[in-house]
Structures are given as C-alpha cells and as structure tokens.
Image: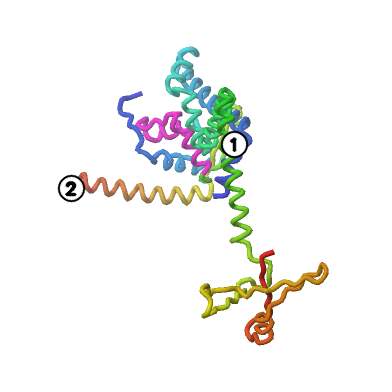
Amino acid sequence: MLSDVIFRLRSLFQRERVEEEMNEELRFHFERQVEKYVATGLSREEAKRRARLMIGGEDKVKEEVREARGVGFVETLIQDLGYGVRMLRKNPSFTVVAILTLALGMGATTAIFSIVDALLLRPLPYNDPASLVVVWENSIKHSHPHNVVAPRIFSIGNVRIWFSRAWLQWQTRAQTSPAMATLSRL
Amino acid sequence: MSETRIDLPQGTLDLLILKTVTLEPLHGWAISERIQQISKEVLQVQQGSLYPALHRLERRGWIKARWGASENNRRAKYYELTRAGRKQLETEQDSWRKLTTAVAHILETT
C-alpha cells in the first residue's frame, strides 16, 4: 500500500525522469525487435518497418503505461486546471462576475458563521456554563406573570448601584445555586 | 507467424508475466519472447499490453524494476519477482487451475 503511494508520487514528481526511463525502455524493446528480424535475414529497413508494425501506436502505448502507473487522474486534473485558467483569462468580464459572486457568497457565509459561532457554538465565558440557570418570577396578580427579577438602579454620584429586594432575599436563601447575579438592559 | 495465435483473456497476462520472471530477472522484450517461445508461438504479447501490465504490477509491488546491462551490453530495465509477487503468483495459479478444470468439466460433460 505504502509502496504504491511512493510509486505514484515518484511518477508524479519525477515525471521527466520517469518519462525518460519509459522512453528508453520502449526504445530498447524496439531495437531488440529490429535485431531479431535482422538476424532472420531481413534488411535493416524492412526489420524496422516490421518492428514498428508489430508495436503499433507508440503514443498510445505510452499513454497506457502512464495510466498503469496511476497518475492518469492527476495529470488530467492538471490539464483541466490549466484549461480553466486560460478560459478565465480569455473572458475577463465573466471572470470578474464569477469572482465577485464567490467573494460575496464567502463573505456572507463567514459573517453569518461568526455570529452563530459567538452566540450558539462557543460556550459562555463562565465556569461550567451548562449549569447556568435563569430565575423567573411568576406573579399571579399581574397580567404578564412571567417576569425576570429586575433590579433597580440607583445612582450615587457616578457610581451605579443595582438593587432588588427579591434578589437579595433569594440570594440569602438559595441553597442549590452557589452564586446569583442580576441582569439588566443597559 | 502462424494464424493459430490467440488473444489472452483478461488478467491472464499478469499471471504469465509473474511466472516468467520467477527464475531470473528479465527485461520486457525478453519476457514477451519467452512467453512466445514457451507457448510455441501460440501466445504473442503485444508491447501495448505488456508495458502497461509491467508498470501496473510494479506499482502493486509484485515485481521490482532495476536497470542493468542487457545481453548485448545496453542499459535495460529488468524486472524481478518480489516476495509479495510470489504469493500473488501462487494465488493466481491456484485460481487459474480451478477455472480451467471447471471449464474443462463443463465442456466434456455437455
């Protein structure tokens, strides 16, 4: 398995050398074939002609060897990429529209993701955020019974004090919650 | 160059190549020559199928290539069987025998 990967990588990154070796290998085969025909009494020209005929399309053989080495896919990909770049260069207006579309799409997605990430995905910056609870007040008398315990804000000079009587009582009596704080819209 | 030559069934070439290089490392041309000789000219391996097969077998790690001096003192690429290739040859030989026996059975009885 590993040797397969190494073999393919060599075919890909030492392409010129591998190509050269393949050409040499096929040339050797051709020459041996010619020698064999010459040994049977054919003229050198006739021998070459026969050998060429027997071997068939050389380029096709090479193409199939490349494929067998397992780099056909990557080579095709590189060619396709090159073609794509050339086509984009030919149609600048199409290129601009395509790039803008991609840029807008990516920008919007990134923006939405950063909001979702901050609000939903990342844990709140507290110890053990899963055990956070919100305490609500239920008043039977009021028309809107579900109510947060709103603190009142007093200002003494420029010091603001947040205060709520209910909250003070809850805080002193609470047995399950280790700490309690008030919330307010600023 | 008789007309009794037959085309190799798919996958058989791999088996023949592996078998041919068991005794000693050979270059591509010698492999095709040897297959032709031993089969009494019935099987003739075309270059167009031999070299892709050799490179595929090399990729699979069943044969190993090495450059060496040929019988006429030129640089040639020699292929030899690896240990994995020996195992593969045994498996393929085995299934080949099973296949031919089975086919022979059917041809003889029906």
Identify the coloring. rainbow
Q: Which residue is mark 1?
A: A12
At label 2, counting other C-alpha atoms closer than 10 Å, the crowd grade (few under 14, some 14-19, many 20 or more) is: few
At label 1, counting other C-alpha atoms closer than 10 Å, the crowd grade (few under 14, some 14-19, many 20 or more) is: some
Above or below for B58 versus A130 = above
User: Which residue is located at x 62 percent, y 74 percent?
Assistant: A132
Magenta stretch contains residue B103: no
| Residue A70 rendering spot, x and y as whole percentages | 52, 39
Q: Which amino acid lies under the numbered mark 1 shown in the image of this protein?
A: Leu
Q: Quadrant of the N terminus of chain B?
A: top left
User: Which residue is located at x 54 percent, y 37 percent?
Assistant: A74
Secondary-structure class at tag 2: helix
| Residue A48 rendering spot, x and y as whole percentages | 48, 16
Magenta stretch contains residue B53: yes
Residue A17 in which image quadrant: top right
Q: Visible in this render: residue A3?
A: yes
- Of all residues, the one furthest to the left in this rendering is B110
User: Which residue is located at x 61 percent, y 35 percent?
Assistant: B67
Q: Which residue is mark 2?
A: B109
Question: Relative to B83, is A132 on the left or the right?
Answer: right
Q: Visible in this render: residue A23?
A: no
Choose mark 2 or mark 1, whichever is in front.
Answer: 1
| Residue B53 rendering spot, x and y as whole percentages | 46, 37
Camera-side residue: A71 or A186?
Answer: A186
The magenta region covers B31-59
Q: Chain of mark 1?
A: A
